[in-house]
């Protein structure tokens, strides 16, 4: 009654039923928050929640206990990756707030995973574009070397026998050749 108005609630009467529920692909896949009491028949809440990590590693796990057992709390945090530890008696409003926060945390993690996936895809596309750019630049550098080889032939011209205007023009060709070599080296 307390939670059914806001959440789709599955109830298991014992740890084995809870594990079977989580293992069922049709029902377990939609469970994002797992709430367990520490004391129950068959296994402790920490043991149950630790086992739920295999079935639903992304689910947020909440542990309720009526006693203060520091070992149980440490085990809950380390072994079962508990999102929140609650002490009995639990106030209904507190439980609703904790469940809302657990659901928000679960959704934020899913959103972050989606964004990271998009970032990885964008990075892969960027790597491919960079490889294409480098291939183009190598091709461009190769193609630019052809006119440079032709321009290099101006080195065999006897410049002393040229008119001043021809020497000046050949000087412009030499300057253009050096700029082109610099550009090819940069590429």
Image (spheres, grey):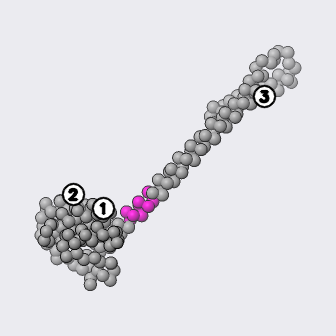
Residue 166, position as x, y percentages in the image: 85, 23
Query: Residue under circle 2?
Result: 78
State which tag comes first along the sequence, 1 or 3: 1
Query: Residue under circle 1?
Result: 57
Q: Quadrant of residue 5?
A: bottom left
Residue 134, position as x, y percentages in the image: 59, 40
Region in magenta: 108-116
Q: Quadrant of residue 162?
A: top right
Q: Is residue 111 magenta?
A: yes
| Residue appearing at x 56%, y 43% in the figure | 131
State which tag comes first along the sequence, 3 or 2: 2
Residue 10, position as x, y percentages in the image: 28, 76
Looking at the rendered image, the quarter that the N terminus falls into is bottom left
Query: Residue under circle 3?
Result: 172
Residue 120, position as x, y percentages in the image: 47, 53
Q: Is the stretch drawn in magenta largely helix, strand or loop? A: helix
Disc 3 crowd rating (10 Å Cα; few below 14, some 14-19, many 20+) is few
Looking at the rendered image, the quarter that the C terminus falls into is top right
As measured in the structure, the alpha-carbon distance from the residue carrying label 2 to the one carrying label 1 is: 14 Å
Disc 2 crowd rating (10 Å Cα; few below 14, some 14-19, many 20+) is few
Q: Nearer the viewer, mark 3 or mark 2?
A: 2
| Residue appearing at x 15%, y 66% in the figure | 44
| Tag shown at residue 16 | none
187 relative to 171, above or below: below
| Residue appearing at x 37%, y 63% in the figure | 109
As measured in the structure, the alpha-carbon distance from the residue carrying label 3 to the one carrying label 2 is: 76 Å
Task: Determine whether, in the image, residue 126 is placed left or right of residue 65.
Answer: right
Q: Secondary structure at mark 3?
A: helix
Near-viewer residue (128 or 163): 128
């Amino acid at each position: 009654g307390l939670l059914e108005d806001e959440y789709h609630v599955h109830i298991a009467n014992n740890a084995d039923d809870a594990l079977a529920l989580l293992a069922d692909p049709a029902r377990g896949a939609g469970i994002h928050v797992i709430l367990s009491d520490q004391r129950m028949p068959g296994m402790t809440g920490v043991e149950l929640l630790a086992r739920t990590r295999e079935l639903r590693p992304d689910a947020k796990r909440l542990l309720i206990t009526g006693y203060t057992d520091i070992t149980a709390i440490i085990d809950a945090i380390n072994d079962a990756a508990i999102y929140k530890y609650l002490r009995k008696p639990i106030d209904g409003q507190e439980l609703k707030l904790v469940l809302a926060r657990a659901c928000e945390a679960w959704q934020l993690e899913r959103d972050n995973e989606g964004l990271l996936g998009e970032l990885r895809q964008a990075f892969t596309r960027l790597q491919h574009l960079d490889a294409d750019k480098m291939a183009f630049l190598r091709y461009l550098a190769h193609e630019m070397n052809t006119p440079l080889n032709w321009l290099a032939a101006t080195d065999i011209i006897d410049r002393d026998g040229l008119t001043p205007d021809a020497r000046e023009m050949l000087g412009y060709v030499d300057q253009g050749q050096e700029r082109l070599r610099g550009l090819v080296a940069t590429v």
